[in-house]
């Protein structure tokens, strides 16, 4: 599904990703953990195609093809989705409208017919109900005045509806209480499939109790310094990062 | 909505880059000698076949104007205007008030057709056009799905459509020149009663030399059966357009009026100084919408229209309502403050504005809400968008008189910046002279950032569409106030004005 090869990236003069290697198979749920400032969010932005970062070396292959030359919208059409840690507010644009515009833009790029409005509505209603979202929220301008939890649910709803192949979840657990966390995790788990992969970025092990990963990777100073299975997450939870990193942080 | 659909379709069709109305119509014109003096005014008055009182009124305004100073308090910078360098009267030679469409110069008809303005009412009525499919047998001729148009070309009104149909409802809709001659009692009574001749420098200039514009009178308890609209076009080089519009809604009447404006692309600055007066008597309502798209000048800021406009509505009667909606995308310089005098008890004034500045455009625009009667309320929604090297200022004044008990105002003033070289400024003046007044002012300034674009694009939406989505969301509240058939056009216009401004 995805292969990152010896990647180096910088923002302005600051090098943040320094020789990162990571491979995610079809159907795999990979977790990336790491202390603050290790480059976790940067990794998610780079995968989604942010123009703020400059790739200086290495490559990102998506289903065997390099995606470095294509922009964020084109990557989305290929099936790459990022659930943002801090989703942007879009005043005056109802979430429903935003969903429709996004879904139709992707369909158009894939030369598929535009959405049938009544089917779309039915589908949105069913998915919103599953995420315990009130329909009135879908009529409000996207993310404007949403609580932290509402924003995260809205991100997951968009993910479910856009039906991506590779999902990046950037600190989706931050700002969620336990009940909301469970609901959101259920939404994610329902999407798990043999042809869909996930990259779950988190600071805490808590989320991984609900979205159980196949692999866990520790990111530090812009590189993966240790990989393992889900037991690595529990180890980190108990012992912290210090002995894996080999220096106090 | 055949007429409107036609308009929209045609606007879609003429897709020249950036300013698409920049073409020039080759037509023979009759002009007054260049410059301004009492002779020019006599020339205009004579051409308009006006009676003595009108000439005296003009001359009085001119004499006051000579003693006045050009206002310089606005946040606008431009080189001094030489008022002797303009022509104050230009009229297509062939065009001395045609009685019907087949008498209008085909060149002129072609121009308006190119602009997408439907003048050919017969075609629409007889259902020749595919859209709408109206049948002649359709008895419901007053269905408000057509738009009556008054077309003003340089200094004269070339045609007013649907006149007879309106007359059957008792509505007078004609050029101001015609009104001065045929409805002089109404004109004498109301002209200058909202904007006095010496109100300000540009209003005085307009009063002296105004050439054409529209006149509307809606009688007691009549709901005007269709949208009225005036289309202004400046064609001639170095010509000032000084239009004068006067709209009176008698007791219990209702009218919705829209004006649109364009001009050819020229290197020099053309002058436009209009005065619009609205009078709403008891229980009357006037809705006035503007889509202003004068030529804004080129990329380096050369040329473009200087737009100095005085627009004021007088809610003269109790329970009256006046609402201004404007979409301003054109002009090099805009100086414009459509205002409401809330004189009648329980009267209401609204101002909804979208002001878009790109390139080197400068806008200083806003409104005045003057609360004089009791229980009066006003609402101001202003959306300013600045891009390129433009400067966009909102200037607004809300005042409550001592006797204006329970005056209410709500102001929302939002600015959106695109790029790093433009400016947005908000200058509100708020003055309450009695303790029962409640005024609220909210303001925000935001910027379309790379982060916003990235977020929207991550959902599969390409950059141009992402920008359009964000901007449409920003202006939505105001677009909703426009008559439906013009909302689409306005949205498209905003899109065109901002093309290529991000990234």
Image (cartoon, rainbow, N blue to C red):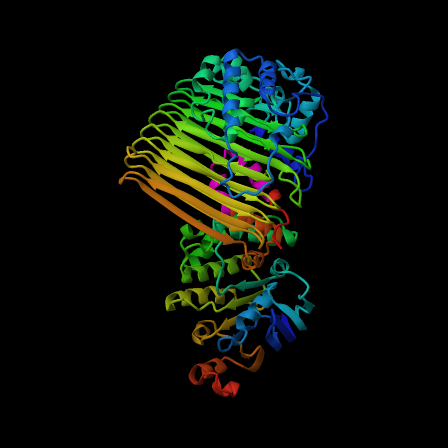
Query: Relative to residue A212, is residue B154 depicted above or below?
Result: above
Is B479 inside the magenta-drawn segment? yes
The answer to whether any part of residue A74 appears in the image is: yes
Q: Is residue B397 left or right of residue A200?
A: left
Q: Is residue B162 left or right of residue A62?
A: left
Is B318 one of the magenta-colored residues? no
Can residue A141 be seen? no
Question: Percent x, y for residue B437?
Answer: 30, 40
Q: How many labels does the image show?
A: 0
Quarter of the view holding residue B45: top right
Q: Where is residue B235 in the image (x, y as percent from the top left)?
A: 66, 28
Residue B491 image-quadrant placement: top right
Where's the C terminus of chain B, which quadrant?
bottom right
Q: Give the range drawn in magenta.
A: B474-495
Q: Which residue is at the front of the view, B203 or B367?
A: B203
A218 and B284: which one is in front? B284
User: Where does the image place residue B329, in percent across and percent down from the top left?
Assistant: 57, 40
Name the residue at 46% across, 47% down: B426
**The N terminus of chain B - image quarter:** top right
Residue B315, how many percent across, how many down?
38, 28
Q: For this rendering, which residue is in front, A67 or B468?
A: B468
Q: Relative to B399, say whether B133 is above or below.
A: above
Seen as rendered, the residue at the extreme front is B67
Q: Which residue is drawn at 69% across and 67% down?
A: A65
Q: Is the magenta stretch mostly helix, strand or loop?
A: helix
Quadrant housing residue B407:
top left
Up/down of B316 relative to A87, above or below? above
């Amino acid at each position: 599904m995805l292969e990152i090869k010896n990647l180096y990236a910088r923002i302005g003069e600051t090098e943040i990703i320094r020789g990162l290697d990571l491979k995610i198979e079809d159907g795999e749920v990979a977790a990336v953990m790491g202390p603050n400032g290790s480059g976790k969010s940067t990794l998610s932005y780079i995968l989604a195609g942010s123009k703020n970062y400059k790739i200086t070396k290495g490559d990102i292959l998506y289903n065997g093809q390099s995606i470095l030359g294509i922009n964020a919208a084109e990557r989305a059409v290929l099936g790459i989705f990022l659930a943002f840690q801090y989703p942007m507010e879009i005043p005056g644009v109802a979430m429903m409208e935003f969903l429709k515009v996004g879904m139709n833009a992707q369909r158009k790029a894939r030369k598929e017919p535009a959405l049938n409005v009544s089917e779309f509505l039915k589908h949105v209603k069913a998915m919103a109900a599953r995420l315990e979202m009130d329909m009135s929220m879908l009529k409000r301008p996207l993310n404007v005045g949403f609580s932290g939890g509402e924003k995260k649910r809205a991100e997951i709803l968009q993910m479910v509806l856009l039906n991506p192949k590779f999902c990046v979840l950037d600190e989706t657990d931050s700002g969620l209480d336990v009940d909301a966390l469970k609901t959101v995790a259920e939404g994610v788990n329902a999407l798990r499939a043999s042809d869909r992969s996930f990259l779950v970025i988190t600071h805490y092990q808590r989320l991984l109790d609900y979205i159980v990963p196949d692999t866990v990777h520790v990111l530090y100073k812009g590189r993966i310094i240790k990989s393992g299975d889900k037991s690595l997450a529990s180890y980190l939870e108990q012992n912290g990062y210090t002995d894996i990193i080999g220096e106090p942080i | 909505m055949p007429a409107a659909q036609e308009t929209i379709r045609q606007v879609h069709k003429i897709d020249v880059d950036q300013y698409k109305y920049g073409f020039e119509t080759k037509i023979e014109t009759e002009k007054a000698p260049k410059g301004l003096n009492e002779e020019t005014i006599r020339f205009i008055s004579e051409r308009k076949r006006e009676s003595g009182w009108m000439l005296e009124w003009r001359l009085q305004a001119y004499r006051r104007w000579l003693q006045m100073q050009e206002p310089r308090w606005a946040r606008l910078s431009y080189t001094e205007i030489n008022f002797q360098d303009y022509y104050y009267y230009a009229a297509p030679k062939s065009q001395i008030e045609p009685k019907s469409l087949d008498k209008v110069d085909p060149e002129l008809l072609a121009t308006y057709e190119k602009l997408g303005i439907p003048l050919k009412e017969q075609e629409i009525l007889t259902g020749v056009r595919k859209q709408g499919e109206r049948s002649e047998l359709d008895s419901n001729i007053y269905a408000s799905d057509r738009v009556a148009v008054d077309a003003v070309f340089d200094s004269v009104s070339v045609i007013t459509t649907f006149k007879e149909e309106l007359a059957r409802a008792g509505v007078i809709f004609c050029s101001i020149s015609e009104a001065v001659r045929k409805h002089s009692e109404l004109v004498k009574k109301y002209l200058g009663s909202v904007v006095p001749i010496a109100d300000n420098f540009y209003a005085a200039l307009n009063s002296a030399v105004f050439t054409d514009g529209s006149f509307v009178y809606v009688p007691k308890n009549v709901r005007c059966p269709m949208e009225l609209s005036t289309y202004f076009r400046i064609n001639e080089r170095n010509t000032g357009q000084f239009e004068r519009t006067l709209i009176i809604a008698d007791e219990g009447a209702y009218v919705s009026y829209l004006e649109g404006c364009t001009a050819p692309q020229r290197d020099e600055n053309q002058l436009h100084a209009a005065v619009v007066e609205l009078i709403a008597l008891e229980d009357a309502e006037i809705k006035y919408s503007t889509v202003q798209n004068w030529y804004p000048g080129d990329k380096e800021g050369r040329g473009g229209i200087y737009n100095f406009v005085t627009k004021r509505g007088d809610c003269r009667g109790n329970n009256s309502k006046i609402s201004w909606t404007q979409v301003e995308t054109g002009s090099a310089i805009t100086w414009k403050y459509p205002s409401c005098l809330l004189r009648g008890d329980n009267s209401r004034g609204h101002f909804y504005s979208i002001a878009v500045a790109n390139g080197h455009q400068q806008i200083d625009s806003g409104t005045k809400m003057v609360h004089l009667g009791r229980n009066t309320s006003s609402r101001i929604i202003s959306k300013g968008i600045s891009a390129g090297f433009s400067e966009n200022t909102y200037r607004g004044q809300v005042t409550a008189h001592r006797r204006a008990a329970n005056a209410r105002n709500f102001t929302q003033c939002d600015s959106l910046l695109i790029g790093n070289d433009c400016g947005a400024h908000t200058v509100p003046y708020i003055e309450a002279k009695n303790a029962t007044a409640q005024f609220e002012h909210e303001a925000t300034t935001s910027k379309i950032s790379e982060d916003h674009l990235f977020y929207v694009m991550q959902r599969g939406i390409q950059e141009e569409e992402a920008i359009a989505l964000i901007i449409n969301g920003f202006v939505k509240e105001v677009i909703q106030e426009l008559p439906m058939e013009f909302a689409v056009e306005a949205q498209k216009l905003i899109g065109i004005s901002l093309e290529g401004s991000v990234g």
